[in-house]
Every structure is written in structure tokens, then in C-alpha cells.
Image (cartoon, helix red, strand yellow):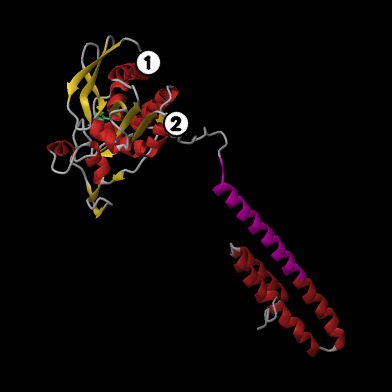
Amino acid sequence: MTESLQQIVDRARAEFAAVSEGPALEDAKARYLGKGGALTELLKGLTALPPEEKKSRGAEINRAKETVEEALRARRAELAEAALAARLAAEAIDVTLPGRGRGTGGIHPVIRTWQRVEEIFGSIGFDVADGPEIEADWFNFTALNNPPNHPARSMQDTFYVDMKGTDGLPLLLRTHTSPMQVRYAREHARALVEEGKPIKVIAPGRTYRVDSDATHSPMFHQVEGLWIDEAISFADLKGVYTDFLRRFFETDALTVRFRPSYFPFTEPSAEIDMMFDSGPLKGRWLEISGSGQVHPAVVRNFGLDPERYIGFAFGSGLERLTMLRYGIGDLRLFFEGDLRFLRQFA
Ligand code: DAH
């Protein structure tokens, strides 16, 4: 039994209604209107009919074809609309929600101290220098009057690099910023001798030791200071450093004391202690920096005549200054990256 035109149209409608996606709809279309489609086949069959029948049958088939085409267009429009509605729902933005904001970074408290130190010393004419953290033994120890096998070396055990420096000794992670004294002074010795330009520099930076507890970290920061000229005395050190502390802590209510000590690269040497006259740390002596008058042997290693040139040096811990400024009790907080701690300084 052959299917009637109406049955074909109904079947096409039903198939169009059943598909839910564009490509499936186009497949369904091909089954009726495509090259081998049901209605196309019927049109092809017209040639076999006698002329009078051909006309009326042809008109019937064409009406059926139009109906199917109409149904196809309607279904296409429905599917497109549904797809758009689904996409809008999926990408819906609730404009009434509060914004998430952006996480803003902050400057680490130790770096804040670093910047502050540069600012204060810069304002009184100190240059700022920078140098290698992987250092030659000669700069880190020997040039600073700390020859191989000298017992003072054991005060500063460090990490060695599996590579030799030009002095034939293994390179190491610098144990202090003091090698920067030697590097900077050797570079500027000529300007001092020939033009009378004083060597006046600070060198802040990272330093390393084999040390780790609540008050020591294998990596920490120091700032080195050096002032060499023809008549720079211990009195200048006292004045400069006391002034620095007052500006750093933003108070004149502090007392500074120079306590005799030992460093191979200074003679005399002093530990700088300070005491706040008020506040939570009031009345306690706090060790803040090593310092001293640069040893003649070191001045000679600068490439200068120690009979003519003299001056002072100091080396202060930036973590120490930061802890005292903000009242921080444990050094490890600086290196843990805990945002609850760091946010307080942002
Ligand atoms: N380099 C010393 C240290 O790390 C600190 C120091 C002491 C630096 C005295 C100096 C100085 O320049 O004169 O322990």
C-alpha cells in the first residue's frame, strides 16, 4: 500500500517535532525534500503519468512540499529560539551581586624596612650599592681580614657552591653584606684619591648562613654601611647611626650605646645597642648592629693607604629592625608567606 500525500506530510511533521537539534532537523528534511527524499521521488514519478493527471497530481505534490517546507522553517525557528534561550540562561549574569574585587598585593615588611633604610641614608648622601649573593671567598672573608683557617670564620658557617672562584676557593653564598664594602671601595678608591670624593655607601641585600630557629633564618637581610675619607671618626659613626635610628623608629625617645665587641674587619669594634624610653619595649637594651672603625688591613684591601684614609662601617639586620619597629616576636613569620600576617602591612 502506498502512503498518501497527507500521511507523508504528517510523518514529516512528526519527525521535525521529535528532533531537538539543528543537524538532526536537517537530516529529517533530507528524507522528504532531499535528492532521494519521499516528495522528490513522487515528483520524479510524474513523468510516467498521462498529461492531464500529471498537472493535478503535480499541484498536489507541490502543495504537500510547501506544507513540509513551512513546517521545516517553523521548527528551525523554534530550535534556534530554544538554543538562544538555553545560552542566555547558561551565561546569565546577576548584575546585582556585589563585585569580587581583585586581590591587591602589598610590600613585604622587610622590604618596607629596606626601602626606608635607603631613603634615610640616601637623604644624608649615602650611595646605594648592590652586589652578588654568590660570592668569592676572598671578598666574603679574606679581604675583610678573615684569612683561611681564622677561627672567626666559624662564626659564619654558610652554603658553598660546587664551583671555584678566581681565588681558587669554592664560591659561597655571602654570609654578610660586608663583601660589598670591598667591592664598592675598590671601584671608588680612585675617585677618592684623585678627586677627594668620599666613599659613602650603604649596601642592603640578602645574606645566608647555616642557621635556623625563632631568631635565625638561613636567608636573611642585612644592610652594610661604609664611610671612608680622610677624617671620618667613630664620632661620625655615633652621630650618623643614632640619627638613623631616631628617624627609622620615628622617635627621639631612644638611647643608643656602643658596646665593645670583636669583628676581624674593624678596630675598634662595637655592638650598637638601643633602648626605647617609652612603649612596650621600654627599658630593655636591644642589640641592633655590628660596627666599628675599618681595620687598616681592610683599608689596604680597598686599595687605599690606611695612613691617610679612615672611616667606619656597620652591618645591621633588616629583619631585626623590622621586628623592633612592628613588635614582631618570631622571625619565621617573615618567610612563611601567611597572608594573615602579611596583610597587616599591606
Ligand atoms: N658583618 C657582620 C656580621 O654579619 C656585621 C658587621 C659588623 C658589619 C661590623 C660591619 C661592621 O660593617 O663594621 O655579623
Front position in the image: 340 or 213: 213
Above or below residue 298? Residue 289 is above
How far from the left and from the top, in percent, is residue 67? 75, 68
Disc 2/disc 1 C-alpha distance (Å): 36 Å
Magenta residues, start to end = 66-93
Q: Is residue 64 left or right of residue 259?
A: right
Q: Main secondary structure of the magenta part?
A: helix
Question: Can you give x and y, in whole percent of width and height, for residue 342 in the image?
Answer: 35, 31
Name which residue type carries label 1.
Glu
Q: Which mark is residue 195?
A: 2
Q: Ligand 1 falls in which quarter?
A: top left
Q: Considering the numbered disc 1 on the image, is that residue within a helix, a strand or a loop?
A: loop
Q: Identify the residue shown where x is 37% and y is 32%.
A: 111
Q: Residues within 10 Å of mark 1 (few under 14, many from 20)?
A: few
Element under disc 2 = helix
User: Mark 1 — residue?
Assistant: 250
Q: Is residue 81 magenta?
A: yes
**Dividing the image into 4 quarters, which one contains the N terminus?**
bottom right
Q: Quadrant of residue 272?
A: top left
Return the residue nearer the eye: 194 or 89: 194
The answer to whether residue 300 is above or below residue 134 is above
Q: Is residue 339 magenta?
A: no
Q: Nearer the viewer, residue 259 or 139?
A: 139
Q: How many marks?
A: 2
